[in-house]
């Protein structure tokens, strides 16, 4: 459910098509006429073109369900069964997780469940904060230390400390495992070309399939609880690490490889002594990605038992407790900011070490940070036994904005209810519902055909085959109707977000100070967990498609703005100069030069917007849409793996179709403008 | 000239890029460029034969794309030649298995790279000690050896610096120290000074000559710079489109270019700095010339070196061979002739 990177363009296969533009127009006209005839007149004769016949459906759901059952009940590798394997993985994760959780949250326990007796208390909040501050100071000096302490201070102040520590514990486990796993897979993919060919499409799919969809099998295999949540987080956060690893290893200079061979490295030495260290700066980007994506997963992971901040947001959402929801959501943001900056600083420091000074002899002088941290832990631990405020953040000092937000919402609802309602109804009745009916009434056969034709026009036979096959699979697995609802919500949201983003982009592109403000706003919008968007939308518009649309637009508008501004600013200044020289007005320069040349970039922004919209749509299932997202969500509550995966794959297919078509279109436009990347 | 034993021999070495290259080459003995093109193959090294003698500086000179880098990588088998033999101390490297290759590279070969290829995460000391670390030599010994090498290239005091803290010239000194740390018998330098600016390049060439006067290694030196080649080489091989056009001493190359291509290269070389007295002297006259000998000059000296000796009063110099015996006479007119040629 991330924002997937724009897929590589398949430009090569496009050559030779451009020549036949006239024929292409004729072909399109014929296709559209055919489509219209099919749509308007064929329903009585060829009902199967409108509703995919049940008898011919591919029973993918059942197959997956059976496969899962077989895995859990019968699959065996001879010495051990599949269930043994999952238990083994669970144990690997569980053990360090217990330790981290004990240190940060529960303390050292003896016994099980509610009978457990606390032998040692967890680290006092002061100690955790001081240690994080020390790491900040070590990596980035006083300013970073202050930032980190401020972030965690914010968390404590709003009473989210305990929850945050639970979340932090699972992040501390998920990140190293995700990094190491991604690194190893990436190295393997680098070493064996055939493996890379297998890995890359899987990564593409994993980054477009909604996380909900693979929560179901994880739930099935690992049960409900923090272990399953960590597994889900790792699976979600690992693909970019793998991608970055393969890229970084490929980027190592060939001379460095030659050096490795010339000094007689064995294969292992080559990997670990030459390649990985040389690729380190690139790899650190991956590490940072893993951290950020793990934090993205916090809320979703709490659906299968992660607890912590994510659970707090989810629970607040169910209670419609906007204050708590926003506070917990912001606490996640604070955690993300602190960990992001820390990881950047540690990476920079690790990569630019100062040359060795004379080694001091005393332990304290040699390891000042470690000894200071140990000192703080011991002192605060002992003090914590005596003084409660040292051990846990005093509840009397915490703030809550809950009543404030409730007041705001109440005030809006009291004073503007009619206007809001009218606005909503006008849009619903005149735009949303007619558009939905229109899409649902289209024959799937015709849509598949038109998509394939679009693929052929933009990217040749391979793109046509891919797009057509994916669209057909959606129909053949019985997901067409729900997919159309998804497409309808997605496209309306994208049109609105794209139009708004485009306008805001044009207005801000030339105003440096305004752009700075806008950028801070969209950066914040993008780091806020997507769930947080739902709450105000629900409180103002109640549940339904309209609410979902508002939330999706709010979430997905950022890339539309960003790419528009970027595209407009990147236009070659010489061309603008040329435009001015021939006497164009400002408006002419904008419309005739800049927007035209920025078009490919803007299209990529729209592409990103679609991806974000799709990922948000799945989450809006919580507010009662009737689309694929809802299907995945229901499957999750019923632990129905087949249903969840099939619906999830359909979402992924929609995303891939949109991505490939738009990317190919952008390449087309770019070629038409004579721009080269 | 006495010939030292050969260290490295290349025999009919070919390198073709493209699929099915080996099969194609075994079917077609001497394919022309056009034939190769039709087969979809790219020829980087074409039927190269040469030998490198012990203790000499053998320079391979050519423009970019002439195949010189590919050839030197074939010599160390970083690139697998399509056909031919590489004999190192009489052993055919192409028959050596992976283990034997690792052994040879670890102990008998060293290489310096155009862009230094220093490992960014290691200090100067760590980089120079790296080849020894790979061999599993313990820390104290490898660092002692590395410190020695760093001293040798004049970087003492910088052991704790990281590559990014050094200038280009200093980085290449580290690269040189690293390649020497294993005491290689055969030293490859792949355009070692090309990435440096001209002043530093000159300084590094001097430094290189100083090192070689101490170390007396067998050297294969790659460059695209004819002046550098002439300055450093005992012998030069000039490459064009994958094959060797001419092999000879700098003087031979300048005096008797094999074809127009080589002549074009050497056109701007200052001949007086290459041509030696022995090549232009006249027969030793029966008796001293009118006005007597202006002085003595070694046969191995370059013409440029003799110029200051011809003062107004001096017209003829006596030429002595290596043993100090007079072997000829060098007249002012001969010198002027050579000077006019460039």
Image (cartoon, rainbow, N blue to C red):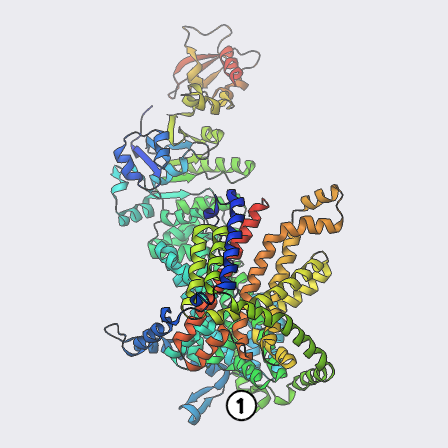
Q: Which x, y percent locates residue B225?
A: 48, 32
Q: Give the x, y percent position of residue A487.
A: 53, 67
Q: Residue furthest left?
A: A78
Q: Percent position (x, y) of residue B256? A: 42, 19
Mark 1: few/some/many CA within 10 Å (<14, 14-19, 20+): some
In this figure, what is the number of numbered marks? Answer: 1
| Subunit that carries the residue with mark 1 | A
Let me know if residue B74 appears in the view: yes
Point out residue B332 in the picture as x, y percentages from the top left corner.
Answer: 51, 12
Question: Does the image show residue A231?
Answer: no
Closer to us: A549 or A327:
A549
**Which type of secondary structure does the marked residue at label 1 adopt?**
helix
Residue at 58% of width from left, 68% of height from top? Answer: A435
Q: Is residue B5 above or below residue A645?
A: above
Q: Residue furthest bottom?
A: A115
Q: Left or right? Give the position of A425 relative to B223.
A: right
Question: Compared with residue B301, is residue B28 higher up or lower down, i.e. above or below?
Answer: below
Q: Which residue is mark 1?
A: A385
Q: Nearer the viewer, residue B276 or A33?
A: A33
A260 or A677, which lies in front? A677
With respect to residue A120, does A57 lie above or below?
A: above
């Amino acid at each position: 459910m991330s924002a997937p990177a724009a897929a590589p363009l398949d430009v090569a296969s496009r050559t030779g098509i451009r020549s036949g533009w006239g024929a292409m127009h004729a072909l399109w006209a014929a296709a559209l006429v055919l489509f219209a005839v099919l749509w308007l007149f064929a329903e009585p004769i060829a009902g199967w073109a409108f509703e995919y016949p049940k008898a011919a459906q591919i029973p993918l759901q059942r197959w997956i369900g059976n496969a899962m059952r077989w895995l859990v009940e019968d699959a065996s590798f001879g010495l051990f069964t599949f269930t043994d394997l999952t238990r083994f993985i669970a144990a690997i994760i569980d053990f360090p997780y217990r330790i981290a959780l004990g240190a940060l949250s529960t303390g050292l326990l003896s016994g099980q469940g509610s009978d457990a007796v606390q032998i040692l208390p967890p680290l006092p909040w002061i100690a955790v904060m001081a240690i994080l501050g020390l790491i900040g100071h070590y990596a980035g000096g006083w300013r970073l230390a202050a930032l980190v302490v401020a972030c965690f201070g914010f968390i404590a102040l709003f009473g989210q400390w305990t929850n945050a520590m639970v979340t932090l514990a699972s992040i501390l486990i998920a990140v190293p495992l995700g990094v190491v796993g991604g690194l190893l897979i990436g190295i393997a993919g680098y070493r064996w070309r055939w493996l890379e060919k297998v890995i890359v499409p899987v990564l593409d799919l994993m980054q477009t399939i909604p996380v909900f969809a693979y929560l179901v099998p994880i739930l099935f295999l690992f049960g409900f609880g923090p272990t399953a949540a960590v597994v889900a987080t790792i699976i979600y956060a690992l693909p970019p690490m793998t991608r970055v690893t393969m890229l970084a290893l490929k980027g190592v200079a060939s001379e460095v490889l030659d050096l490795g061979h010339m000094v007689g490295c064995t294969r292992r030495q080559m990997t670990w002594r030459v390649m990985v260290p040389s690729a380190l700066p690139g790899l650190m980007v991956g590490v940072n990605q893993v951290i950020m994506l793990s934090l993205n997963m916090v809320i979703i992971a709490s659906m299968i038992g992660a607890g912590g901040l994510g659970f707090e947001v989810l629970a607040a959402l169910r209670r419609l407790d906007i204050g708590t929801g926003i506070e917990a959501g912001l606490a996640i943001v604070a955690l993300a900011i602190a960990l992001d900056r820390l990881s950047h600083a540690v990476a920079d420091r690790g990569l630019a070490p100062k040359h060795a000074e004379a080694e001091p002899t005393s332990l304290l002088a040699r390891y000042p940070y470690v000894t200071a941290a140990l000192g703080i832990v011991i002192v605060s631990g002992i003090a914590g036994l005596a003084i409660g405020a040292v051990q846990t953040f005093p509840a009397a000092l915490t703030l809550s904005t809950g009543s404030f937000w409730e007041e705001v919402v109440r005030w809006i609802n009291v004073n503007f209810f009619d206007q809001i309602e009218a606005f909503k109804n006008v849009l619903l009745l005149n735009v949303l519902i007619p558009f939905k009916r229109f899409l649902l009434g289209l024959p799937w056969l015709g849509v598949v055909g038109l998509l394939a034709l679009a693929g052929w026009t933009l990217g040749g036979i391979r793109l046509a085959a891919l797009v057509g096959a994916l669209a057909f699979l959606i129909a053949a697995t019985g997901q067409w109707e729900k997919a159309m609802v998804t497409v309808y919500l997605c496209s309306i949201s994208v049109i609105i977000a794209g139009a708004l983003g485009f306008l805001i982009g044009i207005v801000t592109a030339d105003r440096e100070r305004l752009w700075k403000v806008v950028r801070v706003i969209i950066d914040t919008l993008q780091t806020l967990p997507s769930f947080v968007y739902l709450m105000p939308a629900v409180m103002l518009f109640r549940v339904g498609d309209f609410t979902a649309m508002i939330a999706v637009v709010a979430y997905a508008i950022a890339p539309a703005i960003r790419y528009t501004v970027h595209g407009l600013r990147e236009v070659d200044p010489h061309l603008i100069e040329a435009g001015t020289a021939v006497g164009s007005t400002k408006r002419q320069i904008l419309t005739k030069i800049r927007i035209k040349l920025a078009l490919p970039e803007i299209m990529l922004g729209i592409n990103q917007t679609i991806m974000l919209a799709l990922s948000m749509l799945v989450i809006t299932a919580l507010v009662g849409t009737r689309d694929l997202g809802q299907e995945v969500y229901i499957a999750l509550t019923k632990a129905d793996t087949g249903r969840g995966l099939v619906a999830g794959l359909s979402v992924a297919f929609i995303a891939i179709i949109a991505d490939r078509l738009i990317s190919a279109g952008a390449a087309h436009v770019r070629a038409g403008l004579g721009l080269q990347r | 000239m006495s010939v030292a034993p050969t260290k490295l021999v290349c025999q009919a070495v070919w390198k073709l890029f493209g699929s099915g290259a080996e099969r194609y080459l075994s079917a077609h003995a001497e394919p022309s460029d056009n034939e190769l093109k039709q087969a979809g193959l790219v020829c980087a090294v074409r039927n190269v034969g040469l030998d490198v003698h012990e203790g000499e500086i053998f320079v391979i000179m050519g423009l970019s794309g002439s195949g010189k880098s590919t050839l030197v990588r074939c010599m160390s088998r970083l690139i697998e030649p399509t056909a031919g033999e590489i004999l190192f101390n009489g052993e055919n490297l192409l028959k050596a298995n992976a283990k034997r290759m690792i052994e040879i590279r670890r102990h008998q070969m060293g290489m310096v790279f155009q862009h230094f290829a220093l490992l960014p995460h290691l200090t100067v000391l760590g980089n120079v000690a790296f080849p020894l670390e790979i061999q599993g030599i313990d820390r104290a010994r490898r660092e002692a050896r590395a410190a020695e090498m760093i001293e040798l290239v004049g970087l003492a005091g910088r052991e704790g610096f990281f590559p990014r803290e050094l200038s280009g010239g200093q980085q290449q000194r580290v690269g040189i120290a690293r390649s020497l740390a294993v005491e290689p018998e055969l030293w490859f330098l792949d355009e070692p000074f090309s990435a440096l600016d001209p002043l530093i390049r000159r300084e590094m060439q001097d430094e290189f000559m100083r090192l070689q006067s101490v170390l007396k290694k067998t050297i294969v030196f790659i460059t695209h710079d004819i002046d550098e080649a002439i300055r450093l080489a005992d012998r030069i091989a000039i490459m064009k489109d994958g094959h060797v056009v001419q092999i000879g001493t700098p003087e031979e190359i300048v005096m008797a270019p094999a074809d127009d291509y080589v002549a074009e290269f050497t056109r701007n070389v200052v001949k007086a700095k290459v041509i030696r007295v022995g090549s232009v002297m006249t027969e030793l006259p029966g008796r001293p010339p009118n006005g007597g000998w202006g002085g003595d000059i070694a046969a191995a000296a370059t013409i440029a070196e003799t110029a200051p000796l011809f003062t107004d009063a001096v017209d003829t110099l006596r030429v002595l061979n290596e043993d100090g015996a007079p072997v000829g006479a060098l007249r002012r007119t001969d010198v002027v002739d050579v000077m006019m040629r460039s």
